[in-house]
Image: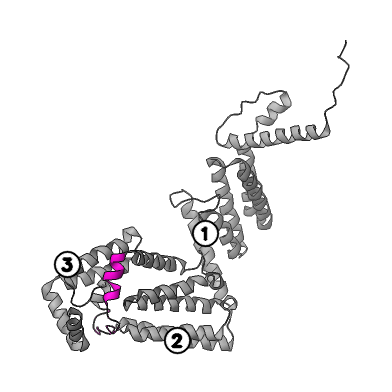
Amino acid sequence: MDYSNSTVTVPTSKKRSIEQLFNDQEQKETLQCCSGIVSSRPIKSVKTQEKQSISPCTIHSEKYNKAVDLMESGSVLQAIHVLKSFLAQNLAAVDKFGLNPSLHNILIKASIKLATAYQMLSLPKEAILTLDQIFLPNQVLHISYGHNLFGELATIYLSAKDELTKNRILKIPSDAEFGTLYMASCLSCLGRECVELGKHSRAVMLFQASVHKIQKYSNDLEFSSYFLKQLYIQANLDLTRCHLSLGSLSSAMATLNTLQTAEQSLDLTYSNPKFLETVTMKATMDSWNSSDRIRQSFFEDIPGTYNCTITRFTECCYQVLCVPPNASIEAIQSSFRHLSIILHPDKGGDTSLMQRLLWAHGTLKDDGRRKSYNGYCQVTHPNFYNQMISMGD
């Protein structure tokens, strides 16, 4: 039987599935080319050979260079359109086929150019959102500080943050809001002056009054101005430090938890200047709270009335080391070792806190300096000697 003139009809559904399979394979080979993987599929025609001779890496570079040329010629809006389309298309392909280093690098460069274009149009918020796709750990394009483009990214990010802050400051508050800002700021300033004098109990009352003043004016912090939000955050952080200085870890944790509960309404996110300080303080207190020896031996042993011991010194050496006034040299050394592990800058601690810890330890570990220090405390704080006797009983 002669089949030379016969034809075979392929069902439409199968034809579409075959075409889809071919397209997926072709797109996969496009991504493989960027990583240096050569396709093993045979070349079936001259037309196919010409198509495969054009590297997908070259196509990506051409689109990127086109956007750069548009920006240099002043067509920033067109460049943004090209870059957004380029990033969206390739990120969709990445979700399906994965990400190779070459494509990752060019997508990072495209994101930098897109953020720069937003900056040229005075759109810092859009620039920050673009760069968040690279800085945030859960994003596909995330890079670490060791990447060769990290410095350029950080520079653009900080510039966008500064411009965003300036735009917020340009907004003039109402008379009622200005009055609240003025009163709350004055209370906070007085609180910080009390802290410098070592009067942490009075500072707590002043910071609490500042917080309540803001809360009374704005029941819903989500609709407050940038000024009020920042002042509210700062007052709560100062209040947390005062509670820690007084040895009240539970009150400090409660204050910080209240602040973190309102993260969204306060815009206390990655781009907020106080975000890192809040996270660091939370991590430090969690470390203290998780250690039975620190919790039992340090904070709970300090009397609640032992507040205003120092006038000449910034703060009490015993409170810094979290030990009672009659603590032995061994207890002081043990406390210093534990706190050094938590507060050491190499472990993510604060440098100024570590310096204060070293100063307090140097004062109390020497018998002569400690005796002189205790004598000064007995003069400036009459209850100091009585507390040492009561704690020794």
Callout 1 secondary element: helix
Q: Name the residue rendered at 63%, 36% in the picture.
A: 28
Q: Position of residue 24 (x, y in %)?
A: 68, 36
Badge 2 amino acid: Ala
Colour basis: one colour
Q: Could you tell me if residue 69 is visible in this image? A: no
Question: In the drawing, does residue 68 fall left or right of residue 391?
Answer: right
Q: Furthest-front residue in view?
A: 393
Marks 1/3: CA distance?
51 Å
Toward which corner of the image does residue 243 lie, by quadrant?
Answer: bottom left
Callout 2 secondary element: helix
The residue carrying pointer 3 sits among few (fewer than 14), some (14 to 19) or many (20 or more) residues within 10 Å by Cα, namely: few
Marks 2/1: CA distance?
39 Å
In the rendered structure, which disc, 1 or 3, sits on the residue that comes first in sequence? Answer: 1
Residue 264 drawn above or below residue 74? below
Badge 3 amino acid: Glu
* Tag shown at residue 180: none
Pointer 3: what residue? Answer: 330
Q: Is residue 290 magenta?
A: no
Q: Name the residue rendered at 55%, 58% in the picture.
A: 132
* Tag shown at residue 156: 1
Q: Name the residue rendered at 48%, 70% in the picture.
A: 260
Q: Position of residue 37 (x, y in %)?
A: 56, 31
Badge 1 amino acid: Ile
Compare residues 56 and 304 and report the one nearer the observer.
Answer: 304
* Tag shown at residue 209: 2
What span is colored magenta in the figure? 292-315
